[in-house]
Amino acid sequence: MEGSTLALISTSCTFTSAVCMAVGWIMIRRGNREAHRKLMIASVILAALFFAIYMARTVFVGNTAFGGPESVKPYYTAFLTFHIFLTILSPILVLRMLYLARKEQFEAHKKLGPWASGVWFVTALTGVMVYLLLFVIYPEGPTTNMFRAYWGF
């Protein structure tokens, strides 16, 4: 399976994870704890599946370098850096949310929830945008190692 196909599958997991998270948020606002719990678990599973596919693609295929114009590359790199920062922060918040829910510390869960879900949602949206920039909007760049794909050399 080629890299762009794996990227599409993993990005689909990210997008679906964000949809589950958003609907889960609506469910808890409506007081439906069970639907909220199931949707959030589904969202976490889909995010973990994304990560597994992404890592497998990185190890076995490589990463796709930005194929757009050189004049756009600094903006893409800044955007990618922002996305990477969020992808580091998001699982930390998610794990904290899961811990608080498991321990039934719902007041703390409720306070952190809007922040954690906001970061998660923006992470998913920026991830979809990275996919679009790498594979849809601009021509696909070369497949290379992670360092070269990010820095361009």
Image (cartoon, helix red, strand yellow):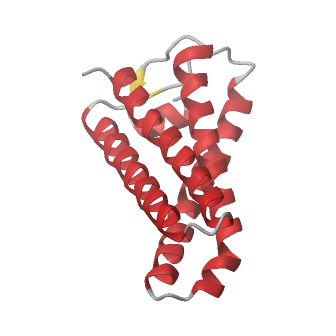
**Relative side of 89 to 146, left or right:** right
User: For residue 114, what is the image quadrant?
Assistant: bottom right
**Relative side of 6 to 119, left or right:** left
What is the tally of numbered marks visible in this picture?
0
Which residue is outermost to the top? 139
| Quadrant location, the N terminus | top left
Residue 9 position in % (x across, y down):
38, 31
Q: Is residue 63 visible?
A: no
Residue 121 position in % (x across, y down):
63, 50
Q: In this view, does 71 lie above or below 9?
A: above
Which residue is painted at 56% across and 57% down in the image? 24
Residue 77 position in % (x across, y down):
65, 36
Front in this rendered view, residue 131 or 111: 111
Which residue is painted at 44% across and 18% down in the image? 142
Which residue is painted at 53% across and 70% down in the image? 33
Q: In this view, does 16 lie above or below 67?
A: below
Residue 110 position in % (x across, y down):
66, 77
**Relative side of 55 to 95, left or right:** left
Front in this rendered view, residue 102 or 95: 102
Front in this rendered view, residue 33 or 75: 33
Which residue is painted at 47% across and 33% down in the image? 148
